[in-house]
Image (cartoon, rainbow, N blue to C red):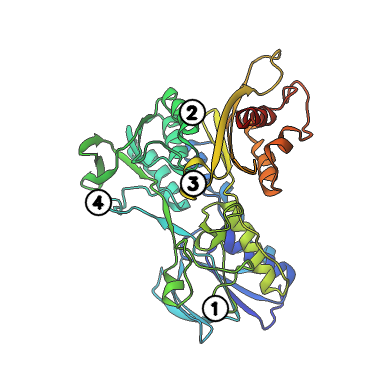
Amino acid sequence: MPVFGKKKVVVIGGNAAGMTAASRLRRLEAGAQVTVLERSRHISYSICGAPYYVEGLVPRVEDLLTFTPETAYSKRGIHVRTEWEATQLLPSRREVECRDLRTGLTERLAFDNLVLATGYRPAVGSVVGADHPAVFKISQLEHLIRLNQFLQTNHPRNAIVVGGGYIGLNTAEALVKRGLSVQVLEKEDHVFRPVDPDIAGLIEKECRTRGIQVSHFTPVSQILFDGNCPRGVIAGGEFYPADLVAVDVGVVPNTDLATEAGLRIGTSTAIAVSPRMETSQEGIYAAGNCAETTHLITKRAVLSGLGTHAVKQGRVAGENIAGMRSEFPGVLQTSITKFFSLSVARTGLNTWEAQRLGFDFASVSVQTPARAAYLRPKETVTVKLLWERKTQRLLGAQIAGSPWTVKRIDVMVACITSGMTLEQIAQIDLAYSPPHSPLWDPIQVAANTALRQSR
């Protein structure tokens, strides 16, 4: 049994950032009394893996969980209260008011330090009917569990996915593999906004090949129902029939507690924090999808919804509470995902972001062999680079191909982080063997093509 000291730490939010902060703190300061409040029934889960549970690749929902409340206590000495909601912060009193969602019981917890890891919520906007319980928001594990149960009991045949983001497209793939007819309605000119239209076109081609219909410029205004079951949506003035509707139109940070407590909200609309993840109130930290961070290229505040950033921020918060001096440097918004047999990765700035921020830049896209041309089966990979004209400094990269080929994005992350130019990238000493790469790696092919274009 853990022996608790005097320091009391409350963590609001029990997923990636919150549980990482709690775990790191307990490792560094075994005497700290750590209590985690989580309004849902699950903690420390992978929302990115949830569509694979719907698809059937992950057989049990428990496989998506790193911790349960019981293992969090037995292995880390962390007290976790699930289905408990923090309702008010009282910074001057160093207290959190919270409520048991099952019984209505309210309580105030004292703290010496507090971590806000409240995450995000779906940004359903003005879509009438999106809050109906029969509509799946697919932003929390419970939503995907309900979706799987709905598939098993209602046996729907036609699905509409509103929005073509990460989880939306992964869910569309899962639904197709469960035998449904699926249509994705996207209000913009292309799906998967982190990448440029030409790279997104490869995603859409893959989706259509697999039977998913993709429509552009079709903002959904209303979801219609027959009793408690959806019967379709109104988008662009037209009716699209469906007996299952899932919504993935973006997320917004959960900052209500912070705002009401007088904590500073940053320009990104998330909670403003220092590199140590401390808020404007001393001793109160924020981490994960509710906290803003700095973009390493632009040096501007940005909002990230990625789990990789959340766990790092949570670790930094936990270390600083434990008395270490730790900082989170910022992000390049690096991400990677898979749609059927096509994987797509990106880092840095895309074209729209570079234009909006006023960079004088150029770009090049190449499709080139992923390994020696004499090996079968032949395989290609698409590499797109963006660079600053004056300095030839790399600003961004996007890669599309098979899963093993697109992990080259990690090389591009290192190149951008170290400030490398096209000339340096073209000459970088990369590994070669026929099964893994051509003599000139696709990254170097793209860099050399960019150099020729620059000259």
Work out whether 26 lies above or below 311.
Answer: below
Mark 4 sits on what residue? 128
- CA separation, marks 4 and 3? 30 Å
Question: The residue under label 3 is which amino acid type?
Answer: Glu
Tell me the crowding category of disc 2: few under 14, some 14 to 19, or many 20 or more residues within 10 angstroms, Cα based.
some
**Circle nearer the N terminus (3, 1):** 1
Element type at marker 1? loop
Mark 3 sits on what residue? 353
Left or right of 280: which side holds 327? right
Tell me the crowding category of disc 3: few under 14, some 14 to 19, or many 20 or more residues within 10 angstroms, Cα based.
few
**Which residue shows up at 69% across the image and 41% down it?**
421
Q: Nearer the viewer, residue 372 or 13?
A: 372
- CA separation, marks 1 and 4? 38 Å
Mark 1 sits on what residue? 281
Tell me the crowding category of disc 4: few under 14, some 14 to 19, or many 20 or more residues within 10 angstroms, Cα based.
some
Could you tell me residue 136's position as x and y percent? 37, 47
Circles 4 and 2: CB atoms closer than 8 Å:
no
**Which residue shows up at 25% across the image and 35% down it?**
240
**Circle nearer the N terminus (4, 3):** 4
Could you tell me residue 207's position as x and y percent? 44, 28
Mark 2 sits on what residue? 202
Could you tell me residue 274's position as x and y percent? 60, 69
Question: The residue under label 1 is which amino acid type?
Answer: Gln
**Circle nearer the N terminus (2, 1):** 2
Question: The residue under label 4 is which amino acid type?
Answer: Val
Quarter assignment of residue 383? top right
Res. 156 in view: no
Question: The residue under label 2 is which amino acid type?
Answer: Leu
Q: Nearer the viewer, mark 1 or mark 4?
A: 1
Element type at marker 2? helix
- CA separation, marks 2 and 1? 46 Å
